[in-house]
Every structure is written in structure tokens, then in C-alpha cells.
Image (cartoon, grey):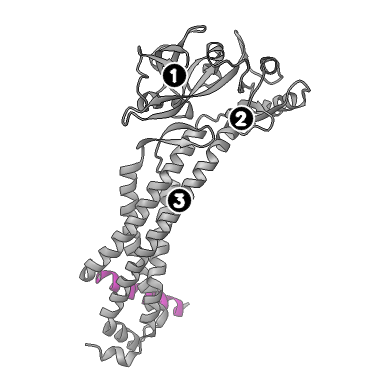
């Protein structure tokens, strides 16, 4: 026990000595710290895109709402349901009802072109035809200006994200879409969810405008989350239906998988390349620190300090410098990127999705771990060199 305490005391003493001498090498320490801060900031910034997009896609995925597509479809774009199939789903067991009837919305999904406000270039925007229960079954749709569209009229409402990103979606304006002219009568929010990137109208009006006779999806509010299996079994076992049934949360998560994985791969790849440069900076800093303290290290060894306390003390110094850089980079990324609003292309629907960057606690923790890892790797070899310095030659250093 005494030996362990003695060893711990040696490590603490040498580490404290090393940390106290950092101001004498502030230039080199700042070089390493800034490099690591840059790695962390880039990593957090890029991965915040992925986290923000995933949050937008999944935030509205409540467990008591089911979405029905045609069997084999992987998105609404590739799905198709007839009027008769949609009508059957209204009467399935497990469906919630209110005074007006079942909370089921048969929906049509089309893609239109609108110019962006900033560049004027056209981009794909999702336009969704919904039935009246859509507002209640989703639960988080609220009008922020104007009013809801009226059934049977060429009226549209725009999500706040779409209205912010695309021209022509201010309340009171009219748009020529396809063969029809549509009047914007309201702007709605959806709790930050993907619906905020969409334009909504009455499905019964959108169908003839695009020569559609059926629907692409059916959304159903369930009595409870536990009713999902009952609803799914009834829909998939009905010989008059060829249906694929998913919880809305699972559907949105599946829709976000490709893009989030792509962004994560790119982000980690860029950060890894930058990390190589930061790693060389950390190695150079620690090698310089060891070279500048050759006599002090040799003196400590001559006084009875072991090799392992010297190794650990150099590693502690390297990790402290890296951690300081990591914290600065993480804080800077949080202040710059968190909540920053942007739009990206959703490869599942070939449309623009507006979202906000999300710098989450998990992402910050991951970035700090990267910084600590760089500090450990950057300090390891200089630490070993310090421990292997011959005492006699070290004492002769001027």
C-alpha cells in the first residue's frame, strides 16, 4: 500500500511540475490546442447536420400513429393505394375515432418546383394532399398565421420551413402550380418536424389537379400505442389489401437513415484527415517539451522517480492541452452551429427538407473523446522517449 501511495505521489508531483511549466511553452501548446480545437469544431459542425436532420425527421414520429404504404414500397413516392383500399383502412380495428369519425387521413404526395428566396433557383418542394383528420391525428400541427385551407377549394397552407426557404409562400399570395392557381391562406408549424418543409392542401382537390385517382399513403391515429399490432395484423391479413404498415416513428427513422449515415461518414472522414495534422502538432509540442526539460527529467530520475511516473506525467500534460483545445472547439461549434437553419436534399423523396443543426450533448461528448484520444496518442511517444532518456547524458544537457 505504501508503495502504491509513493508511486501516486510521484505521478502527481511530476504532472504538477509539467503543468506549471506550460506557460513557458505557451506558443507550442497553443499550436497543438488550436489544431485539436479545429478538429473538434469541424467534427461537431458536420455531425450537427446529421443530428439536426434526424431530429427533424423523427420528432413527429409518435408511437400511436401508423402509416400504411403499398407492400414493397420504401417511400411515399413509390407507394400507391386505391380509394377502396384507403376506405377499408378507415374501418380497421385499433383506429381512434372522434365525433366526426375515424382519425384517418388518406394522403397524396407530389413534388413541385418553387424558386428559393435566396438564390432564385428552382428546387423540389413536397406538396401533400391531406384529409381533415390529418391535423388532429398528427397532434402537433398549429397555424402560426392565416387559417387552414377549406375543403374543395384551391387553397394551400405552407410549413414554416417551406415558407422561409421558398418564394411565393406568403399568406395572401397565389401560385400557379400545374394547371391550377392556388392561394396561400396560412402558415403552420409542426413542432420542428418534417411537415414544416411541406405544402398542404385538400387531397380531394389535389387528385384531379394531378390526374390521380388514388392515394400514396394512409395515416391512422390509433386508440393507443399498444393497438398498433392489432391494426397491423388486420391490415396485412386482409386479402383486399396489399399493405405495408409501420409506426410513424419507424417510418421517419427509416426515411432519414441514408442521408444521416452519408453525412456521418463524410464528417468523420474529414475530421480524421484534420486529426492527422493536429496529431503531428501535438507530437511536435510534446517532443519539444521533453527536449526542453531533458535535464529536469534526468534529475528526477536520479532522485529516484520511476519511469512510469514520468510517462504518465507527460501524458497528463498532453491530455490537458488537448482537452482545453477540445472544449474551446466544442464551445465554438455549439455557439455557431446549434439552431442554424438550412435545407438539404432528401434522397428518399427527392425534395428539399428544412431543418436546424443540432449540437446535442452526445455529440459534444463524442467530440471531447476525440480530443482526449488525440492527446493520448500525441503524448504517448514523447512520454516513452522521456522515460528512456539515459540519466547520465540527460544531466550533461545544458
- Majority secondary structure in the magenta region: helix
Instruction: Tell me the crowding category of disc 1: few under 14, some 14 to 19, or many 20 or more residues within 10 angstroms, Cα based.
Output: some
Q: Which residue is at 41% across, 68% downward?
A: 377
**Residue contact at pointers 3 and 2, CB within 8 angstroms:** no
* Quadrant in which residue 283 is drawn: bottom left
Asked if residue 393 can be seen in this view, the reply is yes
Q: Foreground: 58 or 167?
A: 167
- Residue 82 x %, y %: 67, 18
CA distance separating discs 3 and 1: 36 Å
Magenta stretch containing residue 367, yes or no? no
Q: Give the foreground label among 3 and 1.
A: 3
CA distance separating discs 2 and 1: 29 Å
- Residue 393 x %, y %: 30, 91
Magenta residues (range): 2-21
Q: What kind of element bears circle 3?
A: helix
| Disc sitting over residue 328 in the figure | none
Q: Foreground: 296 or 199?
A: 199
- Residue 355 x %, y %: 42, 34
Q: Which residue is mark 1?
A: 142
Magenta stretch containing residue 18, yes or no? yes
Q: Is residue 216 above or below residue 381?
A: above
Q: What kind of element bears circle 1?
A: strand
Q: Which residue is at 66% across, 19% downward?
A: 95
| Disc sitting over residue 78 in the figure | 2
Q: Give the foreground label among 2 and 1.
A: 2
- Residue 140 x %, y %: 48, 23
Asked if residue 191 can be seen in this view, the reply is no
Q: Is residue 356 above or below residue 279?
A: above
Q: Is residue 384 above or below residue 280?
A: below
First in sequence, mark 3 or 2: give its number: 2
Q: Which residue is mark 3?
A: 266
Amino acid at each position: 500500500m505504501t508503495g502504491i501511495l509513493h508511486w501516486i505521489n510521484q505521478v502527481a508531483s511530476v504532472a504538477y511540475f509539467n503543468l506549471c511549466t506550460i506557460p513557458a511553452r505557451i506558443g507550442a501548446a497553443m499550436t497543438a490546442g488550436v489544431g485539436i480545437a479545429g478538429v473538434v469544431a469541424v467534427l461537431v459542425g458536420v455531425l450537427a447536420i446529421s443530428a439536426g436532420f434526424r431530429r427533424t425527421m423523427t420528432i413527429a414520429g409518435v408511437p400511436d400513429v401508423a402509416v400504411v404504404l403499398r407492400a414493397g414500397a420504401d417511400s411515399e413516392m413509390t407507394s400507391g393505394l386505391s380509394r377502396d383500399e384507403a376506405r377499408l383502412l378507415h374501418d380497421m380495428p385499433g383506429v381512434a375515432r372522434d365525433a366526426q369519425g375515424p382519425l384517418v387521413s388518406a394522403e397524396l404526395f407530389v413534388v413541385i418546383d418553387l424558386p428559393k428566396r435566396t438564390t432564385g433557383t428552382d428546387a423540389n418542394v413536397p406538396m401533400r394532399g391531406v384529409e381533415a383528420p390529418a391535423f388532429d391525428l398528427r397532434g402537433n400541427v398549429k397555424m402560426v398565421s392565416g387559417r387552414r385551407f377549406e375543403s374543395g377549394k384551391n387553397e394551400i397552407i405552407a410549413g414554416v420551413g417551406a415558407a422561409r426557404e421558398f418564394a411565393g409562400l406568403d399568406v395572401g399570395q397565389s401560385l400557379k402550380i400545374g394547371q391550377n392557381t392556388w392561394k396561400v391562406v396560412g402558415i403552420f408549424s409542426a413542432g420542428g418536424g418534417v411537415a414544416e418543409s411541406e405544402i398542404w392542401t385538400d387531397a380531394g382537390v389535389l387528385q384531379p389537379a394531378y390526374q390521380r385517382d388514388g392515394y400514396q399513403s394512409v395515416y391512422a391515429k390509433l386508440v393507443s400505442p399498444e393497438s398498433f399490432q392489432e391494426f397491423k395484423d388486420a391490415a396485412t391479413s386482409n386479402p383486399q389489401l396489399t399493405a405495408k404498415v409501420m409506426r410513424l416513428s419507424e417510418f421517419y427513422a427509416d426515411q432519414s437513415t441514408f442521408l444521416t449515415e452519408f453525412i456521418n461518414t463524410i464528417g468523420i472522414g474529414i475530421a480524421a484527415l484534420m486529426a492527422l495534422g493536429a496529431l503531428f502538432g501535438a507530437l511536435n509540442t510534446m517532443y519539444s517539451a521533453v527536449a526542453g526539460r531533458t535535464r529536469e527529467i534526468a534529475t528526477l530520475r536520479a532522485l529516484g522517480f520511476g519511469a512510469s511516473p514520468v510517462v504518465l506525467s507527460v501524458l497528463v500534460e498532453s491530455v490537458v492541452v488537448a482537452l482545453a483545445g477540445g472544449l474551446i472547439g466544442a464551445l465554438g461549434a455549439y455557439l455557431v452551429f446549434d439552431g442554424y437553419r438550412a435545407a438539404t436534399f432528401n434522397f428518399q423523396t427527392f425534395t428539399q427538407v428544412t431543418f436546424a443543426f443540432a449540437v446535442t450533448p452526445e455529440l459534444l461528448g463524442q467530440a471531447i473523446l476525440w480530443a482526449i484520444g488525440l492527446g493520448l496518442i500525441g503524448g504517448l511517444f514523447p512520454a516513452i522517449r522521456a522515460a528512456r532518456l539515459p540519466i547520465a547524458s540527460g544531466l550533461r544537457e545544458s
